[in-house]
């Protein structure tokens, strides 16, 4: 089940955020994620966040600020079974176009987004991490 984030979700959401970032982005120092923890914790309630619930436990979430996907985060044991796809499909129904950035070294995420209709539009270097990032965009197909 997917539902809108509520304040009481913050600890579970932040735990997933931190653990997923540490595992997925091992090429970025752990201190970067720890230093940004409090900032993200303040920003999450300001974004549109939707959580995926499995047996009363949050196992993943997606955050969108305006038309920007700030991230999809799924607990390790729930990855590659459709949770991320369901979260993305959920927001596809709410938006006509979306953008996001993903680290160039995160090929699994790049492939995931490409499979879901995102296209690469630009490449950058993230000034904080000095890692290459790819900006991607998705546009809703117009009905005929």
Image (cartoon, rainbow, N blue to C red):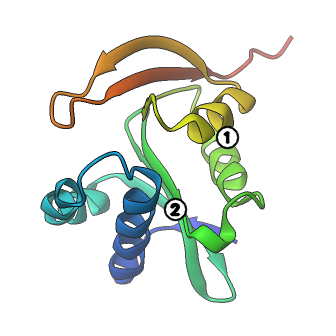
Q: Quadrant of the C terminus?
A: top right
Question: Tag 1's secondary structure?
Answer: loop
Residue position marked by numbered label 1 in the rendering: 93
Query: What percent of the width, then of the height, locates residue 116?
Result: 71, 32
Query: What percent of the width, then of the height, locates residue 75?
Result: 56, 70
Picture residue at 71% right of the left edge, 49% below the top: 85
Task: Identify the disc placed on residue 1.
Answer: none
Kindly tell me whether residue 6 is visible in this rendering: no
Apparent side of residue 60 relative to residue 112 in the rendered image (left or right):
left
Q: Quadrant of the N terminus?
A: bottom right
Image marks 1 and 2: residues in contact by CB distance under 8 Å: no
Disc 1 or disc 2, which is closer to the eye?
2
Task: Identify the disc placed on residue 61.
Answer: 2
In the image, residue 76 sits, relative to residue 125, either above or below, namely below
Is 96 or 28 nearer to us in this picture?
28
Question: In which image quadrant can residue 46 be found?
Answer: bottom left
Question: In which image quadrant can residue 59 be found?
Answer: bottom right
Apparent side of residue 10 relative to residue 140 in the rendered image (left or right):
left
- Among all residues in the image, which is located at the extreme bottom? 56
In the image, residue 29 sits, relative to residue 4, either above or below, namely above
Query: What percent of the width, then of the height, locates residue 36?
Result: 17, 57
Kindly tell me whether residue 138 is visible in this rendering: yes
């Amino acid at each position: 089940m997917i539902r809108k984030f509520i304040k009481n979700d913050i600890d579970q959401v932040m735990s997933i955020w931190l653990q997923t970032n540490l595992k997925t982005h091992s090429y970025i120092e752990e201190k970067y994620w720890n230093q940004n923890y409090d900032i993200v914790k303040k920003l999450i309630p300001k974004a549109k966040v939707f959580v995926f619930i499995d047996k009363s436990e949050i196992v993943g979430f997606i955050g969108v600020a305006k038309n920007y996907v700030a991230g999809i985060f799924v607990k390790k044991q729930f990855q590659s079974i459709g949770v991320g796809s369901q979260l993305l499909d959920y927001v596809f129904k709410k938006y006509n176009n979306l953008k996001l950035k993903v680290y160039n070294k995160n090929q699994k995420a790049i492939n995931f987004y490409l499979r879901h209709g995102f296209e690469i539009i630009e490449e950058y270097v993230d000034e904080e991490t000095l890692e290459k990032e790819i900006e991607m965009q998705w546009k809703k197909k117009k009905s005929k």
